[in-house]
Image: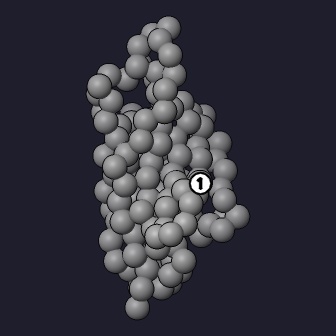
Amino acid sequence: QVQLVESGGGLVQPGGSLRLSCAVSGSIFSINAMAWYRQAPGKQHEWVARITSGGITNYADSVKGRFTISRDNAKNTVYLQMNSLKPEDTAVYYCKAVIRSRNWGPVDDYWGQGTQVTVSS
């Protein structure tokens, strides 16, 4: 069984910063790409950022230059550093990991439960 547990969400003023974490545990042979998504009230699920196992990163245009995704492979953890936050960044943030649970086994997507980020004065 694989679990993804997010933390670090909360309430922050516009212009502030937050750092989200997502720790992966359980039956893991290897973790490929990891990513962050978000969903604001009344809006569709939106991809935010992605990082490969080798550290290559990609960002949505809406967060480029403000958010930084990173990972600690030794800790099976992915981070999202969010700076210069705006009210439109308010959403539930979810992490996703592409995981192979056993050698020669299939690769599957696993999701965290989500953490609320609210940007408001």
Mark 1 residue crowding within 10 angstroms, few (<14) / some (14–19) / many (20+): some
Residue 2 visible? The answer is: yes
Between 92 and 56, the one nearer to me in the picture: 92
The residue that appears at 37% across and 54% down in the rendered structure is 114
The x, y position of residue 7, in whole percent, is 31, 56
- Residue projecting furthest to the top: 104
The x, y position of residue 44, in whole percent, is 56, 60
Left or right, 5 with respect to 56, comes to left
Give above or below for 47 relative to 110: below
Provide the residue designation for mark 1: 47
Left or right, 115 with respect to 17, comes to left
The x, y position of residue 33, in whole percent, is 56, 36
The residue that appears at 50% across and 16% down in the rendered structure is 106
Location of residue 51 by image quarter: top right
Between 38 and 17, the one nearer to me in the picture: 38
Residue 68 visible? The answer is: no
Between 117 and 18, the one nearer to me in the picture: 117
The residue that appears at 54% across and 77% down in the rendered structure is 88
Give above or below for 120 relative to 66: below
Report the amino acid beneath label 1: Trp
For label 1, the SS is strand
Color encoding of the figure: one colour
- Residue projecting furthest to the bottom: 121
Split into 4 quadrants, where in the image is the N terminus?
top left
Split into 4 quadrants, where in the image is the C terminus?
bottom left
Give above or below for 21 relative to 61: above
- Residue projecting furthest to the front: 42
The x, y position of residue 43, in whole percent, is 55, 66
